[in-house]
């Protein structure tokens, strides 16, 4: 009798794990990636921190930049 009870308990646990994993996968599919900024402004290092470069928002070289709008880039 104990063996059968364990088998039924394990079967319920397996079903629950399947449901939870499916729910987690659905949540992951619904998450949206953050929208990239249109432009990124990169500032220099030092006291003045002068503007050095303007990068497109998806440029892989703009790790130090800050997001910017088209209006702020035009200034």
Image: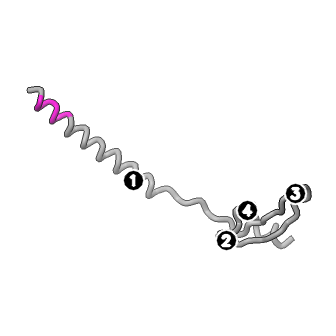
Cα separation between marks 2 and 3: 23 Å
Mark 3 = which residue?
A: 46
Report the Cα–Cα distance between label 2 and label 1: 30 Å
Camera-near label (3 vs 1) is 3
| Along the line of sight, the residue nearer the viewer: 67 or 45 | 45
The disc at residue 25 is 1
Left or right relative to 14: residue 47: right
Which residues are the magenta region? Answer: 3-9
Measured along the vertical axis of the image, is residue 14 above or below residue 67? above
Kindly give the residue lying farthest to the left in the view shown: 1
Give x and y (percent) for residue 66. Answer: 75, 60
Per the image, label 4 sits on a secondary structure element best described as strand
Task: Indicate the position of residue 9 as horizontal and vertical percent values.
Answer: 20, 33
Query: In this image, 72 relative to 15: left or right?
Result: right
**N-terminal label among 3 and 1:** 1
Residue 24: say if magenta: no
In what element is the residue under mark 2?
A: loop
Q: Earlier in the sequence, mark 2 or mark 1?
A: 1
Q: Earlier in the sequence, mark 4 or mark 2?
A: 2
Mark 2 touching mark 1, by CB under 8 A? no
* Residue found farthest to the front: 46
Give the Cα distance between marks 4 and 1.
31 Å
Which residue matches tag 4? 67
- Dot 1: what SS? helix
Please tell me which residue is depicted at 21% across the width and 37% down the height of the picture. 10
């Amino acid at each position: 009798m104990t063996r059968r009870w364990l088998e039924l308990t394990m079967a319920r646990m397996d079903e629950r794990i399947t449901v939870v994993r499916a729910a987690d996968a659905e949540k992951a599919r619904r998450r949206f990636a953050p929208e990239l900024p249109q432009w990124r402004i990169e500032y220099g290092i030092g006291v003045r921190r002068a503007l050095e470069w303007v990068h497109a928002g998806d440029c892989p070289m703009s790790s130090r930049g800050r997001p910017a709008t088209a209006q702020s880039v035009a200034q």
